Image (tube, rainbow, N blue to C red):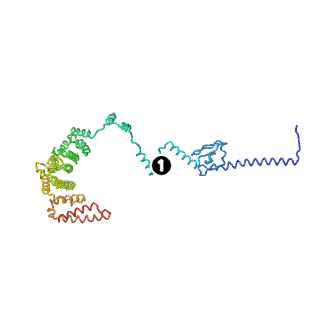
Amino acid sequence: MWVVSSVSPGRSSHLLTVAFLILLRSYQIVQGHVEKSSSALIVVEEGGDEEATVGDEFSDEEDLEVFQPTDHWQTLKPGQAVPRGSHVRLNLQTGHREVRLGVEQMRGEEQRRGEEQRRDRPHETSQSYWSAEELKLKLKKMKDSSPRSGAAYQQDQNKFRSIEDLRKDLATLNLLVETDFQIIKRLLDQLNRTSSTKQRLQILLELEYLVHQVDNAQTLCSMGGLQLLLGGLNSSDFRLQDRSAFVLGSALASNPTVQVEAMERGGLQKLLTLLGTQRPLSVKKKALFALASLLRHFPFAQSHFLSHGGLQVLSEVFREDQGGSVRVRIVTLLYDLITEEELHSKVSTDESPDRLGPRSKGSLDPHSKGSPDQCSKGSLDQCSKGSLRAGLQEGRWCSLVPELLDSAEHDWREKGLQTMLAMVPVCLDQYRRHGSLPVSLGSLKAQYRDLVHQEQALGDDEGYFREILDLLHTLELKMK
């Protein structure tokens, strides 16, 4: 049953007013939510630089699920809240909101991770350097730390293995560790067995590398290797003569033990024979090297060298050499013989024969002054000195050595001038009678003055050419 009632005009206007107020309140509520939502986001295109930062609008996070962002963009699901300071953007390609940590949040995260790492590793520091105070403190702690106990030290020593244990392990790997003694013995055995010239040359080259050490050279002698080298000097193959003389010279250098044995086995005569006969220049160079190694600091060998006409042999080699490389070696050896003889003469004047001991009485020792079968004990130095003076005059060295001044090599000129000054007591009269020598000295002085001026212009007041100019000036003064 339908009931129809009538409403008065005043009642109708009241209902309309209530409805309008309800509608207006609903619009305000909706508008408030829209403004709150729109103020929190800024729409950016993919790859754009502008982002939205979440501020106070999301202050009611306790009523929502809080999303924990990272330093990478991640999709934000509906209904999730994000922490304050996060960056939010709307991806227009996917239509999803994305969020990541803000700049300040990422800095805080890095700082937190660094602190955790330092707590986990307290002995390390994030700095790659220490200040001066920190270094002093660390050094003080090291100094104050107590030394390790004997048991701890012994425990560390036990970590190292002996050579025998290492050899056993290497033997299982088909490896062999040889000492220099074993290598020399093996090479000498091979040198005795083989007849191949190529193999012998290779063996001699390996020996030359080893005998530079004093102990190895003495080991070579004790195994009979010196006899094999002297035998190689008599070989019919010039290559074996060259290589044998090379090894012999390396073994003799500054090694009195090897020098004595070489003299006992006739090494001096064999070397003089190589130099005095027809041989290639390369062989004579190596023989001269071995001869110089035998004579230096060995007065006994020097005395025998002079008595066997060694200076005459060298003068013939000097004349044969036209290139000059052998000449400068000979002049250098001659200078060494003269200066050593002068040194021994000075020592002998300060010491009596009784104080010199048995070595100075002609015994076969590198420090002996001569041979008893040639000179009396009281005149060993005078006899040796007289033999050297006579050899210089007989070999006409007073006219041969100045020939080095004609060379274009400054080093050769320097060695020639040094030797000429050393020979002044013997050759002064011949220098004065040499017609072209004063002219050569004057020409060289003018040349080296110009070179000295060039050195001084470069800021070098005491250069190499200054030394040569001083030698020329000294020689001129002695000739006046």
Q: Is residue 359 above or below residue 442?
A: above
Camera-nearest residue between 369 and 418: 369
- Amino acid under label 1? Gln
Camera-nearest residue between 216 and 352: 352
Residue 277 in sight in this render: no
Q: Is residue 272 above or below residue 152?
A: below
**Residue 109 horizontal side relative to residue 323, left or right:** right
- Quick one: quadrant of the C terminus? bottom left
Residue at which label 1 appears: 127
Q: Is residue 39 above or below residue 425?
A: above
Q: Residues within 10 Å of mark 1 (few under 14, many from 20)?
A: few
- Rendered image quadrant of residue 221: top left
**Image mark count:** 1
- Quick one: quadrant of the N terminus? top right
Secondary structure type for disc 1 = loop
> Picture coordinates of residue 456 (x, y %)?
30, 64
> Picture coordinates of residue 72 (x, y %)?
57, 45
Residue 364 in sight in this render: yes
> Picture coordinates of residue 467 (x, y %)?
25, 61
> Picture coordinates of residue 461 (x, y %)?
30, 63
**Residue 109 horizontal side relative to residue 199, left or right:** right
**Residue 427 horizontal side relative to residue 37, left or right:** left
